[in-house]
Amino acid sequence: MVRGLISFGGLAVVLLTTLSVILQKTGTVDVVGTLFPLEEIDESFQRGFRSDAIARINRMRLAGSIEGVRVDDEVQTHLSRFVETHGDPENIDLQDVFDDLQGRFPGAQYLAANLVTSGSREDLLSRIGAWDAVVSSEFDVINTVVFTSGRTIGALGVMSRRIPQFSLAAANGVGGKFFNRCPHCGEVHALEVEKESRTLILSCPYCDHPFDVLASDVTGRIRRASDFFTGFRLPERSDRVEGETPEEQIAKLWGQIADRCEYELDQEHSETREVWKSSNETWAERAGDCEDTSILLADALISEGFDARVAIGWNGNIGQHAWVVVRVGDKQYVLESTLQSEITPDSLSLLSEASNFYQPEQLFDRDHLYFSTSEPELFREDCFSPELWQSIPVKERDSSRPQLSQR
Ligand SMILES: [Zn+2]
């Protein structure tokens, strides 16, 4: 099931999926008619059954040019224990099997289970072989557990594919599908990050809250939004004048950046993808589009001690857009970093007056991503209140589960 298709900058697509689980229960328990000599179901019987099942399944897969399945030993150990300790294996609830496996292996997002009962080993094998899921390319593993229940012999077959945990390194390595634990609601979900991705706003399909903003740099590497801040400081700052207001200082700094950097659309830079530039790159290349110049401007403001963030969201005139918000005392301003006219203190627009046109969806600075679950009428006019904007720290996220905090 595709839960969300989110675009940014007209080009970006992230596919967030919760992957299907297929439940199937076939076969009938015919206790009366199933008199047969019971074989002993020991470990070697189990192994033999699995290997016969795999041989049968892989012949069919080969015929359909689908990669073969194998046994996943870790899943097998877990599944065997699950069935052995289940008091009534004939009536195993397949959803319990999934919950149990996914609790232990969060990457087991693709699962199909089939419980068959029969009078003979051969019939069990043919029933497992007749199951749709065994020829599905969604799966690369089969595990089976055979059990007896009275005079009945049964088998639980589980098809699976485990996907790796999401990390930037993995996304930049092979790309593809990953699992991730939402830092907000704790649910595990799957996501797909293609190497050719552009700007990605990753949101949890369960709670809908964003947990990451990613973008491709000029080399095609996927990075976190905050990673484009480089601690940039203007090389030649104009001296502060006695009695100068913070707004005058901001306008002066902003003017230096606006004078140097031309507005340039990504399309002129690269035809196929939306890329972001770091502060240093935008400064060095003297050009950038809205998010590039916003990152540069916010980075330079932060270096001068201002509280500034980049906002990404919707602009009533432009569409998807990026701009800078800065706080001075109890005033908050929008800085339109693509402004081509001369920058004066009047170029700073009060957030309260600009909020009809500037509708932020996420904010970020050097260390945090911010999102709001409040009413848009409230958070559009205040981009700094910790009551309105929750923050997610973004540093060293790959090694540990992100912690939510208020700032
Ligand atoms: Zn969530």
Image (spheres, helix red, strand yellow):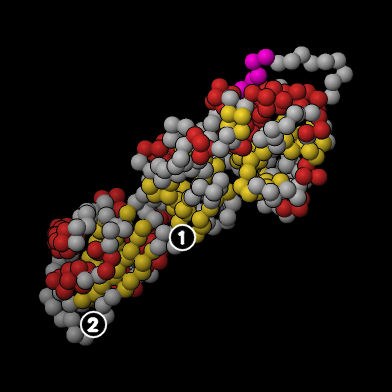
Q: Secondary structure at mark 2?
A: loop
Image spot of residue 208 (x, y percent):
58, 55
Camera-side residue of 349 and 68: 349
Q: Amino acid at mark 1?
A: Val
Queried whether the magenta region covers residue 231, the answer comes back as: yes
Magenta-drawn stretch contains 381: no
Which residues lie in the magenta part? 230-236
Horizontal side of 89 relative to 257 (left or right) equals left
Who's the residue at 58% across and 41% down the image? 403
- Give residue 2's mark: 1
Q: Identify which residue is drawn at 61% across, 33% down.
A: 263
CA neighbours of label 1 inside 10 A, class few (<14), some (14 to 19), many (20+): few
How far apart are the two marked residues, 2 and 1, measured between alpha carbons? Answer: 42 Å
Identify which residue is drawn at 43% across, 31% down: 219
Counting residues from the start of the chain, the first of labels 2 and 1 encountered is 1
Q: Quadrant of residue 103?
A: bottom left
The relative height of residue 335 versus residue 97 in the rendered view (above or below) is: above
Q: Amino acid at mark 2?
A: Val
- Residue 292 in view: no
Would you say the magenta stretch is mainly helix, strand or loop? loop
Q: Which percent across, then down, holds residue 148?
A: 23, 70
Quick check: can you spot residue 293?
yes
Q: For the residue with label 1, is its CB less than 8 Å from the closest atom of ligand 1? A: no
Q: Quadrant of the N terminus?
A: bottom left
Residue 260, image quadrant:
top right
Residue indicated by mark 2: 31
